[in-house]
Amino acid sequence: VLQAKMAALTLPQKATYELHESLCVDTNDNEDHTFCGIVFPIQAKADLPISQLLIRSVAVRGHLGPLTVWVTNDDISNVAESSLENLQRVRSDSRFWTKIYEKNHAPSRTYKKLEFDSPIVMRPGETKGIYIHSAAHHDLAIVYDNSYSMRSTRYSDCFISILSGAAHLSPTPFDAQNIWGWGSAWRDYREFVGQVELGVVYQLWRPDEHKRFGPRFHDVASTILACQRRPESPFAMLPDECIHYILNMCRWDWFEDRADKMDARRSRRRKKKARSVKRDMTHRSEPSRAQREETIASGNRRWRSFNAFGKVREKILDAFSK
């Protein structure tokens, strides 16, 4: 048993290849506004068994000019309740950001691809801020759209969510004063317009990662392990380590698990867990039957004591009155 556990720990944790499926996120373009920059949160989802996402490029359009792209140094999803509120806290301070792209571009009515030398690496559940800025001294540099909620989702699929952000109205990166020299340089309720190119590195199966895979993968793994326990099965000749390596080399969707089904399944689990926590808190706040009975009995004892004291008081007053 100990040998099997040790062998399971040595299994590869993530794929040695990056999956290229032309994963190009293309947001809606309503041609609402243009100005010097746009900053927005992007979240890596944890619905699929993914080891990491690689953001290799973004694409924008407009009069462009001297462009730079920045990314937050840390995850901004665990600082406060809203990712945009966290972004508001760090967007005027360059110490929280790393520049990953810098190049001059001619005006373009179509999307211009800004390819990074090193990709942005994101773990499942992580949220980072991306800031695209132009140093051009006019208000036509980068196209963006209006948003109607600080918490609205601009784009969402099984890999990422792009959330609402803010526009920047200054040709100086991170400047707090706008191009006119008065007022704030940031306009909230704005959304990214463009494309994001992704690469995906999937998580490989391991016994400790079994729950991250889909129901059909679970069925296959259970069936193979059950067959291995039957003496008449050819799988019985294989030790546990071989079965684990076979499953380790199977991709998450080889058994027809679907991303939307897994997303819905995890959503139901989250809701069920929330209901369970709420029910536990309700049960803890409500007294038990024994506690209620003890409270009633204690009240009755106090009432009887009060009545007895009243009768003694009446006898004392009667005695003094005589």
Image (cartoon, rainbow, N blue to C red):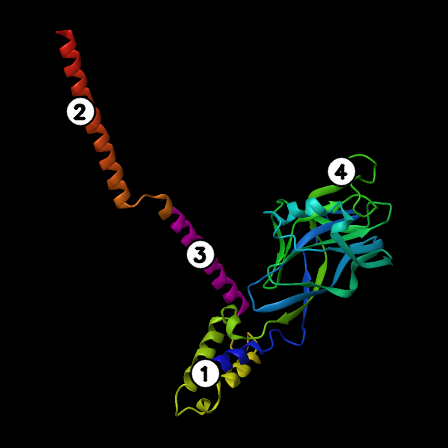
Regarding residue 30, the answer to whether it shows in the image is no
**Residue at point 62%, 73% (across, down):** 14
Mark 2 or 3 closer to N-term?
3
Which is more foreground, mark 4 or mark 3?
Answer: 3
**Residue flagged by tag 3: what amino acid is it?**
Lys
The residue positioned 78% from the left and 49% from the top of the image is 94
Location of residue 138 with respect to 42 vertically, above or below: above
Residue 201 visible in image = yes
Residue bearing mark 2:
308
Vertical position of residue 209 compared to residue 83: above or below:
below
At numbered mark 3, what does the secondary structure look like: helix, strand or loop? helix
Indicate the secondary structure of the residue bearing disc 1: helix
**Magenta region includes residue 52:** no
Q: Which residue is mark 4?
A: 184
Q: Residue visible at 81% across and 59% down? A: 101
Looking at the picture, how far across and down is residue 48, in whole percent? 56, 67
Image x and y of residue 145, in percent:
70, 49
